[in-house]
Image (cartoon, rainbow, N blue to C red):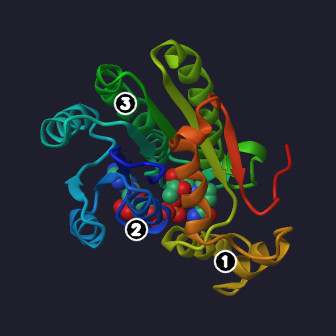
Amino acid sequence: MKALDGKVVFVTGGARGIGRAICEAMAAAGAKVVVSDLNAEDAAQTAKAIDGLAVALDVTDFASITARMAEVEETLGGIDILVNNAGIFNMASIGKITPEDYRRQYDVNVGGTIFACQAVIPAMKRRGGGAIINFSSQAGRRGEPNVTVYCSTKAAVISVTQSLAKELAADNIRVNAVAPGVIDTPMWDVVDAQFAEYENKPIGQKKREVGEAVPLGRMGDPRDVADPCVFLASDAARYITGQTLNVDGGNWVS
Ligand SMILES: NC(=O)c1ccc[n+]([C@@H]2O[C@H](COP(=O)([O-])OP(=O)(O)OC[C@H]3O[C@@H](n4cnc5c(N)ncnc54)[C@H](O)[C@@H]3O)[C@@H](O)[C@H]2O)c1
């Protein structure tokens, strides 16, 4: 018997990076996995590799989240676990933040999380409960210069997780979050390039520096984040809700 046998898991941003590792780990734990992503082609590839179901979804198109989830319910009978992994990063010093960039990061990182939860909760209630895992970041714990918008979205995700955990506990729906540190994914290539510009460093230097500064001595691999997500989704975490678990090699100790 595997930890997630018979469970249906819906992962946003599942096509690549941490999301893909989560899809693989959830499938290995016995779940049927729905790989949803803005990038339909990559989502289809990930889904094919794990015998999952690919769904094209932009989490900022709030109305369409409900429609896509309803289709999944119809096909797979329900959704037990939602992983709100889709997220975007952009740097800007305070004078350079634009309303468009502010809205985009909030719509993906916070709005996408809230409205995906809204869409999935009726299905979870019908199944007698469920588990939701949101994506914060170490950036949401401590703030970073020139990263005001992204950091604040990730702090908001911690708060969303706490409120929904309390609201949904009576329905047997657990809501937790993970706060990854520095994880080697395509997103970090974007982060590295932006830091290179802001801190006047050669490409690749920031990535090396942040890896060396981790107490456990290296950047994280996407699988380092995926395995704790399987735990939070599973019955082993049945008495855990409202928490944000740091998965960062010891960067933030709380
Ligand atoms: N990589 C890190 O070091 C790190 C650290 C802390 C937190 N995180 C968080 O972990 C999550 C995954 O990060 P990653 O590094 O794997 O990122 P990534 O950029 O490598 O992958 C993100 C995936 O989300 C998808 N996506 C983006 N916008 C979307 C939208 N509007 N609708 C649906 N899908 C969308 C992308 O197509 C992509 O497949 C994000 O929430 C990120 O903020 C990452």
Q: Which residue is mark 3?
A: 115
Q: Which residue is mark 2?
A: 16
Marks 1 and 3: in contact by CB < 8 Å?
no
Image spot of residue 5 (x, y percent): 38, 49
Mark 3 or mark 2: name the one nearer the start of the chain: 2
Picture quadrant where residue 60 is located: top left
Left or right: residue 208 compared with residue 154: right
Image spot of residue 10 (x, y percent): 34, 46
Foreground mark, 3 or 1?
Answer: 3
**SS under mark 2:** loop
Reply above or below: 20 against 124: below
Left or right: residue 122 compared with residue 29: left
Residue type at tag 1: Ala
Q: Is mark 2 within 8 Å of ligand 1?
A: yes
Reply above or below: 55 against 206: above
Q: Which residue is mark 1?
A: 196
Residue type at tag 2: Arg
Q: CA distance from mark 3 to mark 2?
A: 22 Å
Q: CA distance from mark 3 to mark 1?
A: 34 Å
Left or right: residue 35 compared with residue 199: left
Q: Is mark 3 within 8 Å of ligand 1?
A: no
Marks 2 and 3: in contact by CB < 8 Å?
no
Mark 2 or mark 1: name the one nearer the start of the chain: 2
Image spot of residue 242 (x, y percent): 63, 28
Q: Is residue 132 visible?
A: yes
Q: Is residue 89 visible?
A: no
Image spot of residue 226 (x, y percent): 54, 59
